[in-house]
Image (cartoon, rainbow, N blue to C red):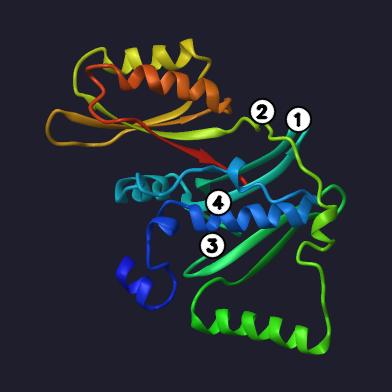
Amino acid sequence: MLRDAQELGYAEADPTVDVGGFDAAHKLSLLAATAFGTQVDFANVKIEGIERISLTDIKDVADMGYRIKLLGVARMNDDGLEQRMQPCLVPADSPLGTLEGVSNMVIVEGDHVGQIVLQGPGAGEGPTASAVMGDVMDIARGLLIPAFGQPANTLVKAAKSNTGVDAEYYLRFSLADEAGVMAAVSTTLGDHGVSINRMRQYNHDGDAAPVIIVTHKVAREKLDAALGVIATMDTSLEKPIAIRIETV
């Protein structure tokens, strides 16, 4: 499938920039600069690719009413600019959840206007050629509009936000099928302030038991601390997977 996407012009020759989320993160940093009038700051974009997303995750989240999307979020918090590119769960019936194929979607949220949804083709030879020729025609007509809506030398440097916004998370574990293992995992999560909203354990063969947990809203720092402890347990057979849930 990746090779087909490359041949159609939907993926880069080096798939790392797509699968790793770097190409989309570059675009996010440009959009953030345009939205907030800040200098482009790609170095402070938190990037997480889709390498660890499995077919199991795709099927499990669909069963719970979600879909997985590589989502970029830029938000101006009280302590600075938050920028992150990562796979997220979104409701299957939301605008992002119904997005198919190579279409892109941008959701802008304003204080008074609420949410504005923009959708259109995001890759391929046709859309790319159209965008390039549109720029050429603007230049020929003398329409020299600043790339960021204002002169680049007027963009201000934004502090990096270190707070972020709490969120619910989808967690996937592969645990030894032994008595007391789930109790130990639950206790560890609770000790770090991570509250469980719902949990599922599917039928399985062998000694590894797949367990899905959806948390209540929690700071990512607390969750990472808990998962770090769980990953060191002898009964944790694989590194836990954590995917943020967004309700955009």
| Mark in the foreground, 1 or 3 | 1
Residue 222 image point, x, y percent: 52, 20
| Mark in the foreground, 4 or 3 | 4
| Mark in the foreground, 2 or 3 | 2
Q: Say what amino acid the circle numbered 4 marks.
A: Leu
| Mark in the foreground, 1 or 4 | 1
**Which sits earlier in the primary sequence, circle 2 or circle 3?**
3
In space, the residues marked 2 and 1 are separated at their CA atoms by: 7 Å
Camera sees residue 28: yes
Residue hosting label 4: 71
* Contact, mark 1 vs mark 3 (Cβ under 8 Å): no
Residue hosting label 2: 163
Q: Which residue is depicted at the point 49% across and 70% down? A: 102
> Would you identify the image quadrant in which residue 144 lies?
bottom right
The answer to whether residue 233 is above or below residue 18 is: above
Residue hosting label 3: 98
Is 165 placed left or right of 36 in the picture?
A: left
Density class for disc 1 (Cα within 10 Å; few <14, some 14-19, many ≥20) is few
Q: Report helix, strand or loop for mark 4.
A: strand
Q: Say what amino acid the circle numbered 2 marks.
A: Thr
